[in-house]
Image: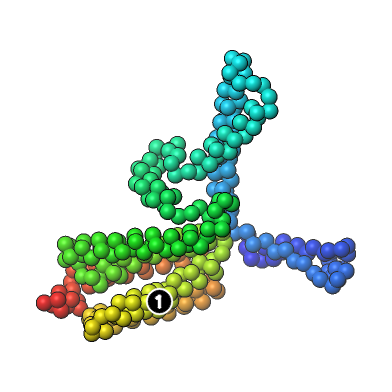
């Protein structure tokens, strides 16, 4: 539906009596409007959740039928008594199996998910043993510990990701600038991208945009300022020499990205569309090609000569 059609479907609800279409005022002088804001993203998200819920309910029904048959057989054989404890036992097993379905230890039913599940299982085990599950009511008061341990794990994983990227770059003779602007930048930005996708699927595009902009502000000011402060506070001399061969081009590219980003959104009436998504991805592809071909392979900034 177009914007005009949505506005035509606007509903006016009057509290405390009164006629819709009249003065539109309630007894306390307030008027309530409900405007449909359902988007295609909402519909896709709700459809996916509905399919997931249907599969979960079907699996629960199948397990309930199996348990009922097993309990009936046990009663016939006389191994358990036919009293209220049977129902209580069934409820406990039902809840336990539901928790097992959400547990990472539960083997996925779809065999296509087995490789990813096997690779993720050690991480699941480490996280489950060290991070309190504050989503559980029994652990909800431990949310500060959950947050702190999450930060510790992010720091640990990031440290080794940087180390391995540096070593791979040395082995393949890839300049550190290229590794930082492509591999490291993409790796550290994946959590931001996933969070933006999650809120965008819920129709909160403004939050997705704010997350992208805010994360870059955080990376520049705190992501650079804090490490320099901690490292240089005990170094002699207390400064670092930075290779500036590509600093000016990178700064120009960063400023150009902001200009193109704002101009594209403003020209589209500050509306995010699929066409803009394709455009942004294509522009990033051009930037990756620039970093690999011009900066690394052709070495237009003479980074190899600077090393010598």
**In percent of the image, x 82 and y 64: which residue is there?**
14
Callout 1 environment at 10 Å: few (<14), some (14 to 19), or many (20+)?
few
Give the number of marks. Answer: 1
Q: Circle 1 is placed at which residue position?
A: 222
Does dot 1 land on a helix, a strand or a loop? Answer: helix
Look at the picture and state if 209 lies above or below 263: above
**In terms of image quadrants, where is residue 167?**
bottom left
Where residue 22 appears, as percent x and y from the top left, is 86, 68
**In percent of the image, x 72 and y 63: which residue is there?**
34
Where residue 78 appears, as percent x and y from the top left, is 61, 16
Is residue 163 at least partly visible in the picture?
yes
Residue that extends furthest to the left in the rendered view of this protein: 308
Colour scheme of the picture: rainbow
Look at the picture and state if 250 lies above or below 94: below
**In percent of the image, x 56 and y 31: which residue is there?**
63
Q: Quarter holding the C terminus? A: bottom left
**In terms of image quadrants, where is residue 228?**
bottom left
- Image side of residue 68 versus residue 161, left or right: right
Q: Quarter holding the N terminus? A: bottom right
Look at the picture and state if 209 lies above or below 140: below
Where residue 204 appears, as percent x and y from the top left, is 56, 64
Most foreground residue, 176 or 143: 143
Is residue 264 at least partly visible in the picture?
no
Where residue 230 appears, as percent x and y from the top left, is 33, 77
- Image side of residue 21 versus residue 214, left or right: right
**In percent of the image, x 43 and y 60: which residue is there?**
149
Most foreground residue, 276 or 219: 219
Residue that extends furthest to the top in the rendered view of this protein: 77
């Amino acid at each position: 539906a177009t914007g005009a059609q949505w506005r035509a479907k606007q509903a006016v609800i009057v509290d405390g009596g009164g006629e819709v279409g009249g003065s539109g005022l309630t007894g306390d002088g307030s008027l309530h409007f409900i405007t449909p804001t359902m988007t295609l993203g909402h519909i896709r998200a709700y459809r996916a959740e509905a399919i997931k819920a249907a599969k979960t309910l079907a699996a629960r029904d199948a397990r309930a039928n199996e348990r009922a048959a097993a309990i009936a057989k046990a009663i016939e054989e006389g191994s358990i008594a036919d009293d209220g404890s049977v129902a209580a036992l069934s409820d406990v097993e039902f809840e336990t199996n539901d928790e097992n379905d959400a547990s990472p230890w539960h083997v996925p039913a779809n065999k296509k998910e087995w490789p990813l599940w096997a690779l993720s299982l050690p991480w699941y085990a480490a996280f489950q043993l060290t991070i309190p599950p504050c989503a559980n009511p029994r652990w909800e008061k431990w949310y500060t510990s959950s947050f702190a341990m999450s930060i510790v794990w992010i720091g640990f994983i990031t440290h080794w990701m940087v180390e391995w990227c540096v070593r791979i770059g040395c082995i393949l003779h890839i300049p550190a600038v290229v590794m930082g602007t492509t591999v490291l930048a993409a790796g550290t930005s994946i959590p931001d991208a996933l969070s933006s996708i999650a809120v965008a699927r819920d129709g909160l595009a403004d939050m997705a945009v704010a997350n992208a902009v805010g994360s870059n502000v955080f990376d520049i000011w705190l992501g650079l300022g804090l490490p320099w402060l901690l490292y240089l506070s005990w170094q002699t001399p207390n400064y670092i020499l930075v290779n500036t061969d590509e600093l000016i081009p990178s700064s120009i590219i960063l400023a150009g990205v902001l200009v193109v980003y704002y101009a594209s959104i403003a020209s589209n009436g500050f509306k995010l569309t699929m066409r803009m998504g394709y455009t942004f991805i294509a522009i990033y592809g051009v930037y990756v090609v620039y970093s690999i071909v011009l900066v690394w392979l052709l070495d237009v900034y003479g980074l190899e000569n600077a090393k010598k």
